[in-house]
Image: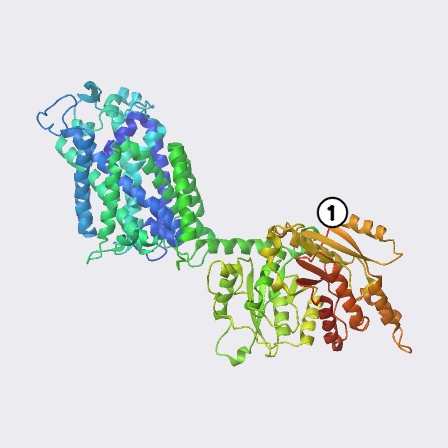
Amino acid sequence: MLASPPSSAGFVVGHAGLYQALAMFAVAYFIIGMTVLSVCAIATNGALDAGGAYYMISRALGPEFGGSIGIMFFLANVCGSALYVLGLVEAVVDSFGIPPGQKAGTGIHVLPQSYWYELLYGTVLLALCLLVCLVGASIYAKATFLIFLIVAGVLGTILVSFFATRPIGVPIRLPHFNGSETENGSFTGFSLTTLRENLGGGYGVDYTTGQMMSFSSVFAVMFNGCTGIMAGSNMSGDLKRPSYSIPRGTISAVLFTYLVYNLLAFLMCATCNRTLLQKDYGFLRDISIFPPLVTVGIYAATLSAAMSNLIGASRILYALARDDLFGRALALAKKTSASGNPVMAVILSWLVVQLVLFSGKLNTIAGVVTTFFLLVYATVNLACLALEWASAPNFRPTFQYFTWHTCLLGIAGCCVMMFLISPVSASASLGFLLVLLLALHYLSPSSTWGYISQALIFHQVRKYLLMLDVRKDHVKFWRPQMLLMVQNPRGSARLIDFVNDLKKSGLYVLGHVELQDLDALPSDPLQPQQDSWLSLVDKLNVKAFISLTLAPSVRHGVRQLLFTSGLGGMRPNTLVLGFYDDAAPQDGLARHPAFTSAREEVPLGFPPLRAPADPKLLSAREYVGIVADALKMLRNVLLARQLESLDKAWELRRAASPPPAIHVWPVNLLRPDSARYADTCSLFLLQMACVLNMARAWRRARLRLFLCVEAGAMPHAQEEKLRQLLKDLRIQAQIQLVPWDAVTRLHWQTRRGPPGGPAPTGEEEEEEGAVNFPANATQVSDEYVCAANKLVLEQSPAPAVRFLYLPRPPADTSLYPLYLHQLELLTRGLGPTVLVHGVSAVTSTQL
């Protein structure tokens, strides 16, 4: 089948009949029309550079999609150029080749026919295309304009010939395995009988390949004659006004060729019998009033198409190389001539086309070429659809005749036809595209083009955040949403990693307070720090947001973040703080696996850690005040001590038995006289330990729940009650009874106090359920707290981490330092420990 529109129309009508041919043209031009609308929209939305469809897709969908589709489009143009060269060779051999079975030619039939001779003819023709493309785009434009005039003259001659030529018989010489055979076709002139015979389909064997034709195979060959719509966009870097020329030229070409195809199909069906249409692809020369002109026109049109694809492939390859998506692999293609012509890209494209020529028969590669082009067209529509759906204010194309419906229809049409033509080729192409996508995602450098994915994500997130109604919250679907306050990431790397395991797919915000006054500064000092914090999140591989603020004090800054962090229904419900003690901070970031294993430097931008002799940024009273503020704002509070000593990788991967443990103490050790295991805080503590155990890295660990019992208190009944609670909450934990009479005895001795001391009032006895807890620090002695600490420490084997009950700070702010002192005594030497105080119901026994 020849590459020119008249000949391809004859091929389609001969096998498919008029009805199916018109349907094929309608489907093909529907897909092309939808794609043209998308191309025009993107082309008129900003300045275009070299690369055509690749440039449009890469700047819209990002480097991964752009680079992978660029390679596919390059291959499509390369195979398309080879297709047209092979079509031209077929036409030349059909006109001037020595008939099979003859040793010497007669008359004009002087060209030998064989696989190697046809490869030689194709190489010569391709070399001619190469010479034109090497000279540059200007000579190519002049050559194509000349070819357009020739083809227009030929088309006029053909139309006249249908009316002027008398009915004639046309002998058709067909190749055969033992020579050749002859069949007779006929040009009947306008005949109703001929038209009726050609209305339905009559698929036969393609005499060039010996393969049986079908709707899909004929469509695949026909569609290649329609792929020139991208020729103008491929030359976008060589056009003076691409946003003006591409829409007008492309739409005009599509409308003109669609009318020509349909007109020729009708004329051929009404004048030529099926034998002539199926067996002689050069029949137009036989019925023309001036046969040599038809031959010249077919040669010129096919040669123009081959050059168009070759120069298009070179421009795509040059754009890919210039964008450095494939690094050194395409470095050679960057070289240009003094006039800016990418000569090395042209030569490399020519070499690839030369390799494709070894396939020999054009219908062999037609299906692959069509699949590649359909995939590119689908992606162009996808790029326009993404830009439209993202609703970005800067997407303002001057071409307005498109909607997201046209883009969607174009994508659907391309995908359906891909699989109808060749399911194997379509699947292989998509697989190849996926491989390229993954390779570019992980290997290509980041670009500054902008990512449409970010715009789409923003659009969807905004929509769903508006739908996230806090009034519909239910305890069944509660999840921790963490705000972790970090003074300096160098001393908090493992704590950041630990809280990431605790968040259970909830919101995670890293908060930081900078003690400065914006009124005294020329600009915001937090903006330059954002990149360092975001790089830290990437390196540590935690799913966290960053929230930085300026404040006159740390306490004011934490208040700001608790009030303002998050958006809509996604706001922190839990505040996490490091513990306030006198331990010298250690640089855990330098020892973190994210940097030690990759041998990467710690991100710059973070100051060195505070020296032990340097003053702290906040006092003990201010620290406890932050805890009190959070509880007043109905936020849960976690205080993490010695988490930087937690070597999670060693703890959780060691092969020793038993597996690592998580110790849970759900009793308020600082108020043993009012200890309960089922209050809100205890249940929250259980929930947090369970959430940690559900994290992928902690699934090997085992929960151990410690039940503190006194003599004569029916410990087995308490254990059974606690076991039933765990069963109702679906928490798997081992319960261990811990006698603590010796510890509580110290507490009661302290409460009786020295002779003449005040006895506890009834008001103090009832304050457990009040908003402001009583002065806890006045009710227990250091001796008692040390005994409780020893009790916790004696439970062996040592766990990976401990969860302890955090009492509410005293109402009297003057007792804040004493309260913090007793927390320090309680957790001294325990290793990684988390003190937990919950204020919200987080567990449910309902389905």
Residue at the location (37% across, 50% down)?
67
Numbered disc total: 1
Q: Residue furthest right?
A: 756
Q: Is residue 338 left or right of residue 732?
A: left
Q: Is residue 162 visible?
A: no
Residue 119: give x, y in percent of width and height: 20, 34
Q: Is residue 654 left or right of residue 759?
A: left
Check the image and report above or below for 348 versus 626. above
Q: Is residue 722 visible?
A: yes
Q: Amino acid at mark 1?
A: Gln
Q: Residues within 10 Å of mark 1 (few under 14, many from 20)?
A: few
Seen from the viewer's position, the closer of residues 59 and 702 is: 702
Seen from the viewer's position, the closer of residues 683 and 614 is: 614
Residue at the location (80% across, 69% down)?
784
Seen from the viewer's position, the closer of residues 824 and 122 is: 824
Residue 833: give x, y in percent of width and height: 68, 62
Residue 497: give x, y in percent of width and height: 58, 59
Check the image and report above or below for 206 versus 435. above
Residue at the location (20% across, 42% down)?
148
* Quadrant hosting residue 480: bottom right
Q: Is residue 194 left or right of residue 579?
A: left
Q: Residue furthest front?
A: 656
Give the residue at mark 1.
846
Residue 141: give x, y in percent of width and height: 20, 49
Q: Residue furthest left?
A: 107
- Secondary structure state at the residue bearing disc 1: loop
Residue at the location (84% across, 68% down)?
746
Check the image and report above or below for 646 versus 614. above
If the image is split into quadrants, where does the C terminus sit?
top right
If the image is split into quadrants, where does the N terminus sit?
top left
